[in-house]
Image: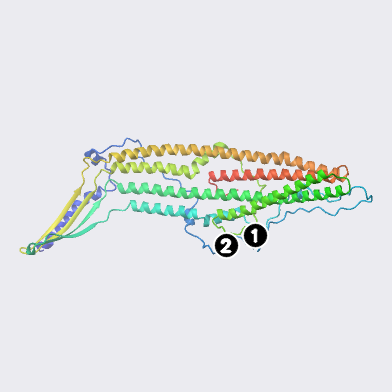
Amino acid sequence: MDRKTLTIKQSLWAVLICCVPFVAWGEDARPSKFARWFKLSKVTVDHARQEPAVAAQPSARPEQHAVRRPTQSAQPQRTVDVQPTPDPTIQQVAVQAYDEDVKPTQQPIAAPVVEPTPQTPESMTAQTPFAADDVTLELLTSLADSHHPKLTVAYQNIVAAQGQTVQAGLKPNPVAAFSSPQWDGPESQFNGFVSQEFVTAGKLKLSSAAASRAAEQARFEWQRVRFEILTEVRQQFYTTLADQRRVEILESLVEIARHSLDISQKLLEAGEGTRGDALLLEIELQRAEVALANTRTEYELGMRQLAILVGMPDYPIERLAANLEAATADYELDEVRFAIAARHPRAQVARLEVDRTLLLLRRACVEPIPNIDLMGGYQRQVGVPQEDQGLFQVTVSIPLWNKNQGNITTAQADVAGARAEWQNTELELATLATDALTTYRTARQFVTRYDESIIPKARETLDLTQRLYAQGQVDFLRLLQAQKTFLDAELSRVDAQKRRWQAAAGLAGLLQEDVFP
C-alpha cells in the first residue's frame, strides 16, 4: 500500500471514529449533564419537560375539501333529479278561493245574501307538498362543503402548516468545498473537504413537534370555518323557509281581505253597509298586499342569498323542502356547556397552543447546547516532494455569554399566556352556550305556547263562527274577520318557528353537529 492511499484511509478512519460519539449523542440523547457542565439557564416552569397531550382530531375531514372549484361558466350539478322551469314562480297555497258570485235575494231592497263555502283552518294552513325539484338543506350543505372558497383557503393553510412541520424536522445539508490554501507553482497545495453539522439535544424533534401542533391548529381552524358556514346556511335556509310559508299564508290573507272588501261594497250598494266599513276593509286589503309583496321580495332574495352562502351564486333554487313544524331536540345547560368545551375548535386550538408553547419552551432551553460541526478532507501538495495530507476539524460554539436567556423568558411568558387564554376561551364558550340555550328555549316556549294555546283558541273561534254563520246568527263579514284572526295567529307562529330554528342552528354550530336537524 503506497503512502498516498494509507494517508487517505487514515483520514477517513479518523473522521469516522470522531463522528460516532457525536452522532450517538445527537437527537436521542438527553442533554442534562452537558447542559449542567455549561451552566445553562434552567427552566422554572414545572411542565417544561411534560409531553404535550395528543390533540383530538376534528370531527370532519378537510382532505375531502381540497381544491374542487367549478368554473364560473359551468352549470352546477345537483345531487337530486331536478327539472327547473324556465320561469320559476312561487307555488300557490292549496286553499280554495271564495266564490265571488253573490246570489241576489228575492227582495230587491234587502242586502245580498252571501253563500260561500267557508274555509277550514286545516285548508288555510295546509302546506304545499314537496316536489321533485325542491331543494333540501342536506343538498345545500353538501354544496357548501364542496364549493365554498373559505374552505379551500382553510385547507391550504393546513397544507402549508404540514409543510412547515416537515421542514422543521429536516437535518442540515452537508457542505462540500474545494480550495487552494497555497497557489505558488511547485509549492501549490490543493484540497477538498466535506463538512456536516450534527444537531444535538433533540432540537429538530422539538421543532417538528411544535410545528405539528400548529398543523393540528390549522385543522381545527378549518373545522371552525366549516361550521360557521354551515350555521349561516342552516339559519338562512329556515329563514327563507319561514318566508316561503308566510307567502302562502299571506296569499290566503289577501284573498280574504279582497273578498271582504267585495262583500262590503255589495252591502254598501244595497244600503246595508257604511262607507267607513268599506274604507277600513280597503285599507286592510292594501296592508295585506304590501305585506305579501315585501315577503315575496324577502323570499326571492333569501333564495339568492342561500346560493351565495353555499359558494354558488348562480345555483337555481326554486323552492325549499323541509318541515317547519318538525320537533327539535331538548338540551340541558351543563351538557351543552361541557360538550361545547370538549368539541368546539376554539377550545381545541387554545389547548394545542399551550402544548405548542411548552414545546417551544423546551426548544429554547436546549438552544444553548452547541451543535457539532465535523469536517474531513484530503489535501495534495504538488512539487517536490509531493505530499498527501488528511484534513480533520471539529467546530463547537461555547455558550459562555449567550445562553438564550431572553428567549427562554419569552417562552415562559408565552406558556403562561397560552394557559390563561385557554381558560378565557372556555369562559367565552360557556357564555356563548348559555346565551344560545337561552335564545333556543325562549323560542321553543313561544312555539309551544302558540301550538298549545293560541292556535287552538283561534281555530276554536273560527269553528264557532262558522257554525254560527251556518245557523244565520252572524254575518259573513264576521266570519271573514275570524278567518283573518286565525291567519294572523299563524303568521305569528311562523315567526316563532323561524326564531326557534335559527336558535337551534346556532346551538348545533356550537356543538359541532354534522347532522341537522
Residue found at the far front of this picture = 275
Q: Amino acid at mark 2?
A: Gln
Horizontal arrangement in the rendering, residue 65 relative to residue 258 (left or right): left
Q: Amino acid at mark 1?
A: Asp
* Left or right: 235 in relation to 170: right
SS state under label 1: loop
Badge 2 density bin: few <14, some 14–19, many ≥20, Cα 10 Å: few
Residue 327 image offset from top left, x and y in percent: 65, 45
The residue drawn where x is 31% and y is 49% is 204
**Residue 81 drawn at (x, y percent):** 62, 62
Q: Are marks 1 and 2 in contact (CB under 8 Å)?
A: no
Quadrant containing the N terminus is bottom left
Q: Which residue is mark 1?
A: 133
**At 70% from the left edge and 50% from the top edge, which residue is drawn?**
292
Residue 20 percent location from the top left of the image = 22, 51
Can I make out residue 481 in this image? Answer: yes
Frontmost residue, 91 versus 110: 110
Q: Is residue 400 above or below residue 147?
A: above
For label 2, the SS is loop
Q: Nearer the viewer, residue 76 or 504?
A: 76
Residue at horizontal 66 percent and vertical 43 percent from the top = 496
Query: According to the image, label 2 marks what residue?
Result: 77
Quadrant in which residue 461 is drawn: top right
Q: Is residue 137 above or below residue 186?
A: above
The first of marks 1 and 2 along the sequence is: 2
